[in-house]
Image: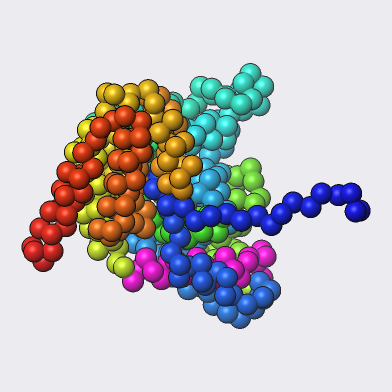
Amino acid sequence: MSDVEIFPQLQIPETLAAGPGPGNTDPRVLACFSNAGLADHMQTDVLRGMIECKQMLRLLWGTRNTYTFGVGGTGFSGLDCLFSAILPGDEVVAFTNGTFSGIDGLTIRMKASGREDLKANPMDPKPANVTMITVPHGQSVNAELIDSVLAEKKPKWAFMAHWETGSGRINDLRGFSDACERNGVMGLVDAVSSLGIEDFAIDDFPGVVGWASCPQKGVLCLPLTYAPVSFSDRYIDAIKASGCHTYVHHPILEARHWGIVDGKDVAAGSYHRTHSGYAVAAFHEALRITLQHGRTQKARDYAHHERALREAVVTLGCEVTSNMTSLVVLDLPPALAGREKELVQGCRARGFGIWPTLSEPVQIRIGILNQLSEQAITEIVVRFANAMNEMGAGADVARATEGLRRYYTQKMAAE
């Protein structure tokens, strides 16, 4: 074995995550993860942590849904669990307006496809029972469109992303829920980018029967921990009546691993899949921090700091096209048009993690997840402005930072 090359220990430097997500994890979450003792998945404190995570998730989601828990993995794991209710041949309408709702749409088409549909196009099936409604990049899905399509198609299921980070657009959740109710449709929502950022309670949207989010955006836990999901009794009844083609992401079987059986929380100590005590500890602390901040106050803070960032990048000569409060999507000044990816690569080389959009037209995405302070927003603006100027933008950094100073000073005076 002496001739086997052993790679050096992997060292990953700290970076400023200023994209659509994941954001920089709170040090308190990292501490809980690293300080957790070595324990098996049936240890008393691991079980207690899982019970408390369920309770905190219900508070964060704003729901009485018993079937509210975390799916092990990333946001895609939670979404796969959500979409597992869709069976081949089911009539579905999916509204998409960006990269990630587009991926959700592909998942839906795969799950709703019959064998012949998959044989015809295995990687991108086009089953006739799925209607894809594509809204142009940079626009939101609105209530009028939703209602007109659902009234015509009368599908079993309808899907929409609440916040689409691919284009930075908020879609009409109230319009979606109301249209689903009016037309007898079961709504499914991707809330990956809105949970823990926007102030909403899912029980206020009865037309939506299934929700999925992720651990690493608004909740700000570590990726690959738990993706929050919540299912109404109507969704669970549909699964009981028809089943689904999965075991690992079966909504009812997944719930059993969190002590949810026959619509009730069972006594602590029931057997479950091998959950990591480290992941449970991190997820538990992330939920605690979010609830301590308060759903309403956190939403206000995001809106306040996003406005500061928005005004600053406009001062630098950019045009903002998004309306999310955790993310600014922008076009660069005309002098840098077409060089978006070059700018992003230069920033990343310096430990500043902004993102391009992943579909056309290429734009810049700058996020503020867990960056809710004047100091953090100022650092983001200065680093972005300096990167543009290195490419010849000639942006007025001093004017932008002075605008930030005035913005925050006026806010403090008002308080």
Residue 26 position (above or below residue 307): below
x, y (%) of residue 153? 38, 27
Query: On the rendered image, what quadrant is the C terminus found in?
Result: bottom left
Residue 225 position (above or below residue 34): above
Check residue 280 for magenta coloring. Answer: yes
Residue at 15%, 48% (x, y): give it.
Answer: 403
In this rendered view, identify the residue nearer to me: 332 or 211: 332
In this rendered view, identify the residue nearer to me: 256 or 195: 195
Residue 294 position (above or below residue 249): below
Check residue 153 for magenta coloring. Answer: no
Q: Which residues are magenta?
A: 271-292
Residue 388 location, quadrant: top left
Magenta stretch, main secondary structure, is helix
x, y (%) of residue 396? 21, 38
Residue at 60%, 50% (x, y): give it.
Answer: 249
Residue at 23%, 42% (x, y): give it.
Answer: 397
x, y (%) of residue 401? 21, 49
Left or right of residue 231, residue 303 in this image: left
x, y (%) of residue 338? 37, 23
Left or right of residue 117, residue 227 in this image: left
Q: Is residue 120 visible?
A: yes
Residue 291 location, quadrant: bottom left
In this rendered view, identify the residue nearer to me: 306 or 278: 306
Q: Is residue 239 visible?
A: no
Residue at 37%, 53% (x, y): give it.
Answer: 369
**How did the renderer colour the structure?**
rainbow
In this rendered view, identify the residue nearer to me: 191 or 348: 348
Farthest residue, direction right: 1
Farthest residue, direction bottom: 44
